[in-house]
């Protein structure tokens, strides 16, 4: 396993992700965003690195929370 910082714009989200995982108004999403804002990202997202892009494997809510908080990488 390799840890590295990447630009959020390069990450491709799965179109098969359930809507419950992307609902920004859901109480669990709001709680996670608040937690990340206070403590930072404790568990990194997992990416499957292909030839041309980086597909998000795990961490859709964490990634979207990061986007909402204005993070760029």
Image (cartoon, rainbow, N blue to C red):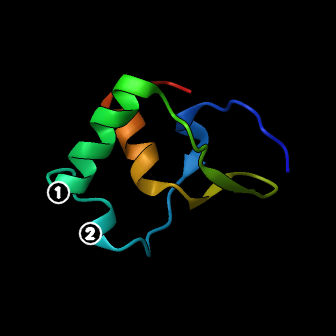
The C terminus lies in which quarter of the figure? top right
Mark identifier at residue 20: 2
Circle 1: element type: loop
Image coordinates for residue 36, horizontal then vertical, percent: 40, 33
Report the residue that reaches farthest toward the right.
1
Which residue is depicted at the point 65% across and 54% down? 46
Give the vertical position of 3 relative to 45 (above or below): above
Location of mark 1 (residue): 26
Mark identifier at residue 3: none
**62 sits to left or right of 73:** left
Front residue (pair 71, 33):
33
Quarter of the image where one finds residue 15? bottom left
Quarter of the image where one finds residue 47? bottom right
Which residue is depicted at the point 78% across and 38% down? 3
Q: Mark 1 vs mark 2: which is more N-terminal? A: 2
Which residue is depicted at the point 63% across and 58% down? 55
Which residue is depicted at the point 38% across and 45% down? 64
Circle 2: element type: helix
> Gap between marks 1 and 2, in whole Å?
8 Å
Give the vertical position of 32 relative to 73 (above or below): below
Give the vertical position of 10 relative to 60 (above or below): above
- Tell me, yes or no, whether the two marked residues, 1 and 2, touch with CB atoms within 8 Å: yes
Image coordinates for residue 41, horizontal then vertical, percent: 51, 34
**72 sits to left or right of 55:** left
Give the vertical position of 32 relative to 26 (above or below): above
Label 2 packing within 10 angstroms: few (<14), some (14-19), many (20+): few
**30 sits to left or right of 46:** left
Front residue (pair 51, 36):
36
């Amino acid at each position: 396993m390799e840890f590295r910082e990447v630009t959020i714009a390069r990450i491709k989200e799965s179109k098969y992700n359930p809507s419950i995982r992307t609902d920004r108004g859901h109480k669990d999403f709001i709680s996670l965003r608040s937690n990340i804002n206070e403590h930072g990202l404790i568990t990194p997202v997992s990416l499957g690195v292909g030839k041309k892009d980086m597909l998000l494997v795990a961490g859709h809510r964490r990634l979207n929370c990061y986007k909402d908080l204005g993070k760029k990488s």
